[in-house]
Structures are given as structure tokens and as C-alpha cells.
Image: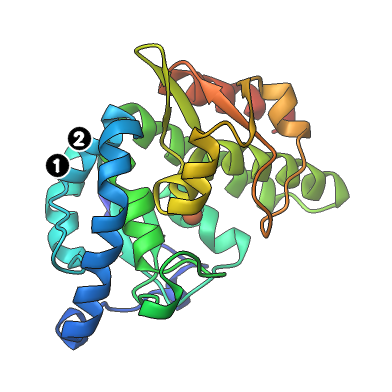
Amino acid sequence: MNPQASPLTVAETYLIQQNWSAYTPEQHAVWAELVRRRMPQLHRHACQEYLDGFDQIGLREDTIPNLAEVNKRLGPRTGWNATPVSGFLPPDAFFEMLAARQFPTTTWLRSRDSLEYTPEPDIFHDVFGHVPMHAHPVFADFLQHYGKVCAHLTDSAGGTAKDKLERMGRLFWFTVEFGLIRQNGEIKVYGSGLISSHGECTRVLAGGCEVKDFDLDAVLNQEFDTGEMQPVLYAVESFTQIYEATKQAESRLG
Ligand SMILES: [Fe+2]
């Protein structure tokens, strides 16, 4: 659980410090605008675990999160940390960090003229979109285990490992990034791509995409396009289901 117990090797070179005091009033105002745009819909349509996590890790509407402060609250709950990194990580570094319960977190923030979409993740996508779920014990264990399985696959050379990693990438996409869950007879969102995107979330909630029951085989075989709105998504019944599915994938692919 303690990151000191799992020192990073390949990811080490991507770690940076978050210079929180360097954010400008305009950047804090953009963060506030982004949060204000999302919260009314999320209060109605995000899963309860996301909303609880948002409060538990102390996210605020008016200021960009200080990751050290977030980690003071998150670490004792589940052993996860939001760890600042310089940008996109290669797969081996990314999975090494997940396996060590360290979520690679960008520190830059989109500008006011691209509130809805950025091609690369920023701190709004990473922290507002992802990190609240890491306060939930089952989701926390699932994500760490996912990282461990994929880290193991990246260690194995050869073409079949590449194919297996592509399949595991689909499991990530249709859960962590675009996952839906049924709660109290309704479809709720928990995937960061839906949490952090007003347009895509609105389209999905309005029935603009097919929602299928989560099925591991279907997900492992479902191709996706990162640049397009999603034509099909998968709804789970519980977070235990994705943790169990990851273990099942491990025994099949690992
Ligand atoms: Fe993401």
C-alpha cells in the first residue's frame, strides 16, 4: 500500500512535481467553470461512489486541486496516490504505476477555449474524472490488480502479449474510461470520459449509444475509436464485477 514499498523503476523518469502556486487566477477560474458545468448532471447521474469519493478526497469547485492535499486524504483510505507526471506514459511505465497504486496525473489544465474536449488528458480529466473513484475500496483493488496483470503482460515478449494487451486495453476503456453501472434501476456513469465530458455524457444519457450488459468476452472483443463518440458501452451491476472480470481475464490471458 505504501508507495515506498513499491519503488518505481521504468516510470521514475516521468515523475514531476506539481507547482501548485504557479496556477494563475484564470486557471483556477477555468477549473471552477468546468466543475460548475458538470456537477448538476453528475449529482443526478453519476454513481454514488464517485460522488462520495469527490467529497472524501476534498475536491473543490473553486480551485485546482493540490495533489499533495488530495493524497493526504486518499492515501489513508485505499493506498492510492494521484502522482504528477509529465504527460503520456508508455505502457510499461503506466502499468507499473497502477500496480503500485499511483495514478499518473497530468498537472496542466485546458484553456477556456477548449472547455469541452482536449485530445490529451489534463488535470481536469485525470483528477476530476478519475481520482474520486480511487477512494472506493473495491474499485481501488480492481485498478491495482488491472495494473499488475498488464505489467506482467508487458514483461512477456512476443506478438501474443501485444494482442493480449490490446484486449486488456478494451477492458480499461469500457470500465475505467467509459464505464456505466446500474444503481437503483437507473444507469449511472463512473467512467472518467463520461464524468469529465458534458457532451458525451449527455449523449449517452439521452440514449445516443447502445448500452449492453457487461460481458467480459464481449468487452475484450469490442474495438473502439478514441477520437469518436462511443457507439456501444457496457453497464455493470457492481464494482466487484469488474474486479472479478479482471481476475478472469488474468487467468485466461496471463
Ligand atoms: Fe482517462
Residue with the most extreme right position: 159
Disc 2, SS: helix
Residue 32 versus residue 240 in the image, above or below: below
Asked if disc 1 is less than 8 Å from ligand 1, the answer is no
| x and y, in percent, of residue 15 in the image | 39, 74
Q: Residue at x 59, y 49 (%)?
A: 151
Q: Are marks 2 and 1 in contact (CB under 8 Å)?
A: yes
Residue annotated with mark 2: 52
Residue type beneath disc 1: Gln
- What whole-number distance in Å separates the C-alpha atoms at marks 2 and 1? 6 Å
Residue 198 versus residue 48 in the image, above or below: below
Q: Residue at x 40, y 59 (%)?
A: 125
Q: Where is residue 221, by image quadrant?
A: top right
| x and y, in percent, of residue 110 in the image | 40, 76
Residue annotated with mark 1: 56
Give the crowd class for mark 2: few <14, some 14-19, many >=20 residues within 10 Å.
some
Q: Nearer the viewer, residue 227 or 173?
A: 227
Observer able to see residue 155: yes
Q: Nearer the viewer, residue 39 or 15?
A: 39
| x and y, in percent, of residue 226 in the image | 67, 56
Observer able to see residue 7: no
Q: Where is residue 55, by image quadrant?
A: top left
Quadrant occupied by the C terminus: top right
Q: Residue at x 53, y 53 (%)?
A: 95
Q: Is residue 101 left or right of residue 23?
A: right
